[in-house]
Image (cartoon, helix red, strand yellow):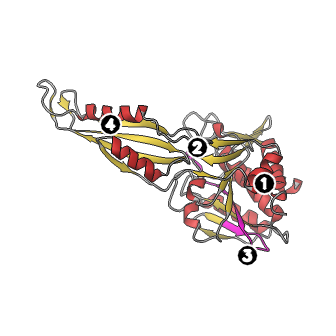
Amino acid sequence: MNKLTKEAIELLKQLISKQSFSSEEDETALLIKQWFSTHDIKFESQNHNIWAKNKHFDASKPTILLNSHHDTVKPNKAYTRDPFKPEVIDGKLYGLGSNDAGGCLVSLMALFAYFYEQENLNYNLVIVASAEEESSGQNGLNSMLSVIPNIDVAIVGEPTLMQLAVAEKGLLVLDCTAHGKAGHAAHGLGDNSIYKAMEAIEWFRTFKFPKVSDTLGEIKMTVTQVNAGTQHNVIPAECSFVVDIRITDAYTNAEVLAIVKENVYVEVKERSLRLNSSSIPVEHPLVKAGVSLGRETYGSPTLSDQAALSCPSLKLGPGDSHRSHTADEFIYVNEIEEGIEIYVDLLNRVIV
């Protein structure tokens, strides 16, 4: 365990040192392949996704997916450190992707290596180090589900302070357009599309969906972009705006879209319906094992690769979600050490 933990932390430092923006993960993919090879783990890859199954995989047994991603967002302008220079200062490992989600990924890789050669497990293990999570790209985990064996339940590595995120909000992004008629502002002629958009925006601001999730609470709708007009004296014929909707397990994305279209009198186009909410029953053995280890359950407002999965899934990993996408991103080294220990203790209570 100690050896695997040290090797995992060293791998994270190497991953930080390589640029791995979404769809540009070739260098980090190579590092992950080399790590698996060093540990005599047979792996396969596709489109920067690297996956493996435990040595004594048995198709008659249920399978647990271990997943986290090795792509990152681009560093923001507020960075004061080199985002690609891994440095440990006062117990903090700094670097882009250290917290989201490099610490989770290397911890899950250490977990997989720990159980890789064990026989007579109650579950198979499959690990996927996935690409394009940050961009919800077409060549990420979603593209691997037809490639890897059938999955019964998943642990998705995202920073949760090693608490149990038993549900996760989905995402629906809407491009809306209010249509009016152009005219001269001085004459008051025309049909102002901005006013029509304002009516719809007010509905998005105030509407409450009747069903409230026990774990995730209410659906949250936020207008995040507005665009209209070309000059001060022309009534605009079109006003477009974007709505970010975080959806709970009380509704599907399609159901929410239908309710929106019934209530607003603007053109509504969805970008995707596939990023649905996800969850795992609190009575599932993985959750019960986590609770027995003193972990708490909660509902997560952030989106992850769980959205690609149709099976029950648990979000769990070292690091803190509040540090994700921030300047001078970091993870505490002892969070990784503790994370690997908890991961192993969790699976020892379920698969051995």
Q: Nearer the viewer, residue 210 or 6?
A: 210
Label 1 to label 4, Cα distance in Å? 47 Å
Q: Is residue 19 positioned above or below 204 on the image?
A: below
Question: Going by the picture, which residue comes out furthest to the front?
Answer: 210
> Residue 118, image x and y in percent?
85, 69
Q: Which residues are magenta?
A: 51-74
Q: Secondary structure at mark 2?
A: loop
User: Which numbered mark, 1 or 4, is in the foreground of this view?
Assistant: 4
Residue 103 as seen in the image, left or right of residue 201: right
Q: Nearer the viewer, residue 322 or 167?
A: 167
The kind of residue on which mark 1 rests is: Ala
Residue 171 falls left or right of residue 80: left
> What numbered label is drawn on residue 8?
1
The kind of residue tagged 3 is: Ser
Residues tagged 1 and 3 counted as in contact (Cβ below 8 A):
no
Could you give the CA–CA distance between mark 2 and mark 1, rounded to whole angstroms?
25 Å
Q: Earlier in the sequence, mark 2 or mark 3?
A: 3
Closer to us: 61 or 194: 61
Write down the residue under mark 2: 302
Q: Is residue 9 visible?
A: no
Q: Looking at the rendered structure, which numbered label has been put on residue 107?
A: none
